[in-house]
Image (cartoon, rainbow, N blue to C red):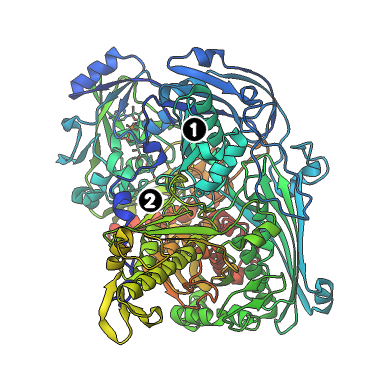
């Protein structure tokens, strides 16, 4: 398809990007283009202008920061999947980034764009919620840090303002005996998540001392599975305990479970516990428990 | 691809690399979309958003006033200029109702995607912008999309000429079907939905038309599998004499049948160029491709098989409702009939067969050939109910097949539907597949796994298919509105290099390579010295095109015969030059020599030079070294094979994992085993796609819900195992090279083989059938209903 006409601006720096956003009302940021351009081609989005931030070096790259790892918003899925640091301290994130779409999508798509776009079937929001990651954004009023848990508010909607630019994602460091994992049921055509489950569990001498489990794909936005988490904490991390906790996901799903011609809401609800169970078990294994 | 061929003695049979690939892989190939002419305009087509509606009013004023727009046309503008799009397979004895198929709808739109208007502008962007400005006032009408429902009383009527939406009713019968069912100890039944598929060639369809008002000549670059047919049909619809029409199929990025027919966009593009006297290009977007280029399959099948208690098949009786879409596409009626019903007895000795086929109009995109075209739908019916029979009788699925197979034959076998298979050794292919797969061990593995709650399934499928279409006399007898012969010209230049011109039109299959191998093998020239030219009606001889696995089977035969004519002439000229009797001239490895005197010889290059300079020709011999052959095959060819699939079903989620796929195919002698392997890979994968993922879905209003690649799932490499490709060799007795077609073979049996494997895996759950594609949800629901 052909998009409607639009003006194109390339930002040379972060401040240039902010200036261009301010002077072009109705403009959209363009990062990897793998969500925005399809929308524009289908004419589901017709911004008057795009501000291309794709070549701003300061927004790219993975570094260790005091209490975790800092991932520049322009870092691609492929870079995240291949990063030894991410694999080590945020295994679920590396796993999820490696399962995004296909190699072409992973080489172009960026974490910042993925998070800002907030497609309910995306992988990274789910993981970031489970890992208690922070989203760093800058706007006319300065920089702010937003917790991933709470950032996603609905189908393609977030608490980010139109004039804000995401600069980085910060993932906290691993605690002792903490492990994380992401399990995905991919749509055979789009490759987006039909069901995505991210889990992070911490054990203390075999007992689950902390757990964060997040769901994506089958709910309007990445959401924590509170009932599952509650059932896990304080219990063991053996197969039976995990299975029992996972079965609680039904109460976490709420009444807005996604259904489509490929997989109905009933089916997704029925098999969700299986994916929750598998994600927790894999996280527990990484925590050194299985 | 893992084929390794150690230093072959013969170029025929050698897996040399495809000469097509460097240009394809480096992006230097030129497709229709890549060709740009001076002064070129772009067309964008407005398509119906309704499955069925009356057009009350169209207003193109705003579009015409938009920037860059040169013209906008509606159906009314085509009145008297364009004829309706013809259907070219008029199956006899079927009360066929060919309803008017206008290139642009005039009063009623009948499917989402039906052309309504066109805008021509300086750029594609401007054309698409302007299309949005056309205002159409529609009066929506109820739609019908399911071929079985559409024939029922009260269903919306799509064409006044076709009551109850029935486009045709065709029956095939052979043997005494009543007696077979009366005699039967057991009858098994199934209802099978061959869901509608979207061919999804990598290149969408498109056209570039250049009409020269001064001469009345039109050149059309077209994404087609058959440029000569395009010229013929285009000349009829647009009233341009065939001698003023040149059709070029440049690089064509796959077709799978969807580039056989002439579709609305082709005629619209030509029309615009004729109106404006300028080159006009139209290239489908992918969404447009999904709506407007033809689809495949779409059968509802009721099948029943009669058998004795020891598993001997007595008869097969079926009723099929075959969706045709809103209009009859070029070859559509022949597919669920001739290419389907006649193959119903497959590789088995079945004494009686009867099938009633209803071709049904629905408010959907027209259906055409799709890789396999009719034969996968027949093979599936047979291979499915035979598994059901095995299940009922508690006989192993392999054993029950063995009890019914036609014994090996090498020169003709008559079957109950009236066809004469050319050669076959079905048991041989089956045995090879079983041995390679380790069938007995697989069954043990399955039993062990079940004890641990893991569900492995083993599927077996055997097929024989009809291809290499076909003798023209038969084509005429079955209502095909054309011939099915092919032609080839072999032309040697003075330097000994050769050009070959063929009427067929390869579009990815690799005949530029294999056909050079044929010439090299016959005449001893280097394969690199032979260039194959195809796809341009101005330079190539008449031919009917590339489909139905017929290019090597028919066009290749024409080429073999033409090269042999060259050889005969070369012998005559050699005998003259060496002053020996022609009976004493022998040929070996590119040399013509006097028997017993190998040093007294001429190479084909010597002969090419001498024939071209013509200084010393025998009396009466014409100069030049060129031969033309028009080859009409005496019969079809009947490739066959046996496939085995191993799957594992995740009992917790219903997800099917394909673990192994073994394909044994027999296409007679292989010119290039690497290319054969590639064809098998592609074919198998497309068949698996139907079993597991692909499905075109319409809602009740005729909206295509799977309108893009985000919803319509084609197979991906990462969910497929390495396909284990093996062969047996049973030459065709009537083909000059002993070859058969291989283009569709893989697709024909792989759908059912994988399906059978999944049902086999679910045996502990008592599952007998699941609608395709076997999505996790459907498998999960089938299991949950029964429980292990
Ligand atoms: C075929 C295909 C398959 C895919 N499969 C998956 C999948 O399986 N899982 C998955 O998670 N995703 C998938 N995606 C989406 C992919 O991950 C995208 O790359 C990603 O969602 C968006 O990132 P981007 O860099 O391409 O953003 P863009 O498309 O450039 O932008 C997306 C949106 O984010 C905004 N934006 C971009 N960067 C910033 C920023 N720094 N600050 C603020 N706003 C910003 C843009 O304005 C726009 O609104 C797929 C995409 C395609 C095309």
Image quarter (top left, top right, bottom left or bottom right) of the C terminus of chain B: bottom right
Helix, strand or loop status at disc 1? strand
Residue B41, located in which quarter of the rendered image?
top left
A52 over B227 or under it: above or below:
above
Answer with left or right where residue A66 lies relative to residue A34. Answer: left
* Chain of the residue under label 2: A
Outermost residue toward the front in this view: B619
Q: How many marks?
A: 2
What is the distance, in whole Å, between disc 2 and disc 1 at their CAs? 80 Å
Q: Name the residue rendered at 79%, 80% in the picture.
A: B185
- Which circle marks residue B217 in the picture? 1
Residue A260 appears in the figure: no
Q: Is residue A188 above or below residue B308?
A: above
Residue that numbered label 2 is attached to: A233
Q: Are marks 2 and 1 in contact (CB under 8 Å)?
A: no
Report x, y in % for residue B224: 49, 46
Q: Chain of mark 1?
A: B
**Quadrant showing the N terminus of chain B:** bottom left
Q: Who is closer to the viewer here, B549 or A149?
A: B549
């Amino acid at each position: 398809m052909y998009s409607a006409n639009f003006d194109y601006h390339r930002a040379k720096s972060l401040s240039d990007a902010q200036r261009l956003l301010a002077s072009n009302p109705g403009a959209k940021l363009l990062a990897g283009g793998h969500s925005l351009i399809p929308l524009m081609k289908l004419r589901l989005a017709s911004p008057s202008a795009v501000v291309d931030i794709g070549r701003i070096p300061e927004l790219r790259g993975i570094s260790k920061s005091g209490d975790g790892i800092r991932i520049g918003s322009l870092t691609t899925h492929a870079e995240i999947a291949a990063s030894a640091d991410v694999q080590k301290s945020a295994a679920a994130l590396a796993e999820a980034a490696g399962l995004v779409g296909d190699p072409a999508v992973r080489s172009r798509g960026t974490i910042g764009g993925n998070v800002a776009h907030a497609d309910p079937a995306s992988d990274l929001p789910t993981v970031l919620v489970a890992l208690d990651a922070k989203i760093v954004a800058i706007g006319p009023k300065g920089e702010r840090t937003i917790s991933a848990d709470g950032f996603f508010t609905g189908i393609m909607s977030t608490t980010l303002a139109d004039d804000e630019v995401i600069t980085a994602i910060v993932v906290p460091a691993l605690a002792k005996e903490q492990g994380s994992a992401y399990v995905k049921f991919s749509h055979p055509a789009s490759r987006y998540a039909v069901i995505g489950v991210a889990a992070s569990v911490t054990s203390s001498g075999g007992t689950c001392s902390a757990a964060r489990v997040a769901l994506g794909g089958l709910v309007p936005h990445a959401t924590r599975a509170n009932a599952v988490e509650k059932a896990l904490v304080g219990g063991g991390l053996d197969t039976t305990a995990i299975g029992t906790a996972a079965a609680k996901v039904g109460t976490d799903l709420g009444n807005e479970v996604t259904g489509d011609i490929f997989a109905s809401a009933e089916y997704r609800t029925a098999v969700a516990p299986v994916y929750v169970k598998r994600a927790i078990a894999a996280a527990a294994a990484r925590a050194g428990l299985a | 691809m893992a084929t390794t061929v150690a230093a072959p003695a013969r170029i025929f049979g050698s897996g040399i690399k495809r000469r097509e690939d460097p240009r394809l892989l480096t992006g230097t190939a030129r497709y229709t979309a890549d060709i740009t002419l001076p002064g070129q305009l772009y067309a964008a087509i407005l398509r119906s958003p309704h499955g069925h509606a009356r057009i009350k009013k169209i207003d193109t004023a705003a579009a015409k006033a938009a920037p860059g727009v040169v013209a906008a046309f509606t159906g009314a503008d085509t009145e008297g200029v364009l004829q309706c799009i013809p259907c070219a397979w008029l199956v006899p004895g079927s009360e066929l109702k060919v309803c008017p198929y206008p290139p642009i709808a005039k009063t009623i739109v009948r499917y989402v995607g039906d052309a309504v208007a066109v805008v021509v502008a300086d750029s594609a962007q401007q054309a698409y912008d302007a299309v949005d400005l056309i205002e159409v006032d529609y009066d929506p009408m109820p739609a019908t999309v399911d071929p079985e429902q559409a024939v029922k009383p009260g269903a919306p009527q799509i064409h006044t000429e076709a009551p109850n939406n029935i486009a045709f009713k065709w029956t095939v019968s052979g043997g005494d079907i009543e007696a077979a069912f009366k005699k039967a100890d057991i009858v098994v039944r199934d209802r099978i939905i061959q869901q509608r598929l979207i061919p999804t060639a990598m290149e969408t369809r498109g056209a570039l038309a250049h009409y020269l008002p001064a001469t009345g000549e039109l050149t059309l670059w077209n994404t087609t599998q058959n440029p000569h047919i395009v010229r013929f049909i285009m000349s009829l619809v647009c009233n341009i004499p065939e001698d003023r029409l040149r059709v070029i199929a440049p690089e064509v990025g796959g077709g799978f049948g969807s580039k056989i027919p002439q579709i609305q966009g082709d005629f619209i593009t030509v029309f615009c160029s004729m109106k404006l006297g300028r080159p006009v290009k139209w290239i489908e977007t992918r969404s447009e491709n999904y709506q407007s280029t033809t689809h495949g399959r779409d059968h509802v099948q009721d099948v029943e098989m009669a058998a004795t208690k020891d598993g001997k098949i007595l008869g097969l009786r079926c009723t099929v409702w075959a969706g045709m879409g809103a209009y009859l596409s070029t070859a559509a009626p022949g597919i669920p009939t001739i290419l389907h019903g006649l193959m119903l007895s497959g590789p088995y000795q079945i004494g009686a067969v009867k099938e009633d086929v209803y071709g049904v109009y629905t408010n959907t995109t027209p259906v055409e050939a799709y890789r396999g075209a009719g034969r996968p739908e027949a093979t599936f019916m047979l291979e499915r109910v035979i598994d059901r029979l095995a299940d009922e009788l508690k006989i192993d699925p392999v054993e029950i097949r063995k009890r019914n197979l036609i014994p090996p034959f090498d020169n003709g076998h008559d079957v109950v539907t009236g066809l004469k298979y050319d050669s076959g050794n079905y048991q041989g292919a089956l045995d090879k597949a079983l041995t390679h797969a380790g069938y007995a061990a697989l069954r043990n593995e399955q039993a062990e796994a079940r004890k641990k709650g893991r569900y492995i399934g083993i599927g077996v499928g055997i097929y024989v298919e009809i291809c290499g279409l076909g003798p023209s006399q038969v084509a005429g007898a079955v209502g095909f509105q054309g011939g099915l012969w092919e032609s080839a010209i072999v032309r040697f230049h003075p330097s000994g290099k050769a050009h070959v011109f063929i009427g067929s039109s390869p579009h990815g299959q690799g005949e530029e390579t294999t056909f050079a191998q044929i010439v090299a093998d016959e005449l001893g020239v280097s394969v690199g010295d032979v260039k194959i030219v195809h796809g341009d009606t101005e330079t190539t001889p008449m031919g009917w095109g590339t489909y139905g696995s017929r290019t090597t089977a028919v066009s290749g035969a024409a080429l073999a015969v033409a090269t042999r004519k060259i050889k005969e002439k070369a012998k005559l000229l050699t005998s003259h030059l060496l002053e020996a009797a022609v009976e004493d001239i022998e040929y070996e490895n590119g040399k013509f020599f006097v028997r017993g005197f190998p040093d007294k010889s001429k190479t084909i290059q010597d002969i090419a030079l001498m024939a071209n300079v013509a200084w010393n020709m025998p009396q009466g011999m014409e100069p030049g070294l060129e031969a033309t052959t028009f080859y009409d095959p005496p019969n079809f060819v009947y490739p066959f094979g046996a496939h085995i699939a191993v799957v594992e079903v995740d009992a917790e989620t219903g997800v099917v994992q394909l673990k192994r796929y073994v394909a044994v195919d027999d296409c007679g002698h292989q010119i290039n085993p690497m290319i054969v392997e590639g064809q098998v890979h592609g074919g198998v994968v497309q068949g698996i796609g139907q079993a597991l993922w692909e499905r075109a879905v319409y809602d009740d209003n005729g909206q295509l819900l799977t309108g893009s690649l985000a919803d319509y799932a084609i197979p991906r490499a990462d969910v497929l195992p390495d396909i284990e490709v093996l062969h047996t060799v049973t030459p065709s007795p009537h083909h000059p090279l002993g070859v058969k077609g291989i283009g569709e073979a893989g697709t024909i049996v792989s759908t059912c083989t994988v399906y059978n494997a999944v049902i086999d895996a679910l045996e502990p759950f008592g599952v007998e059938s699941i609608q395709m594609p076997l999505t996790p949800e459907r498998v999960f629901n089938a299991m949950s209903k029964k429980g292990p």
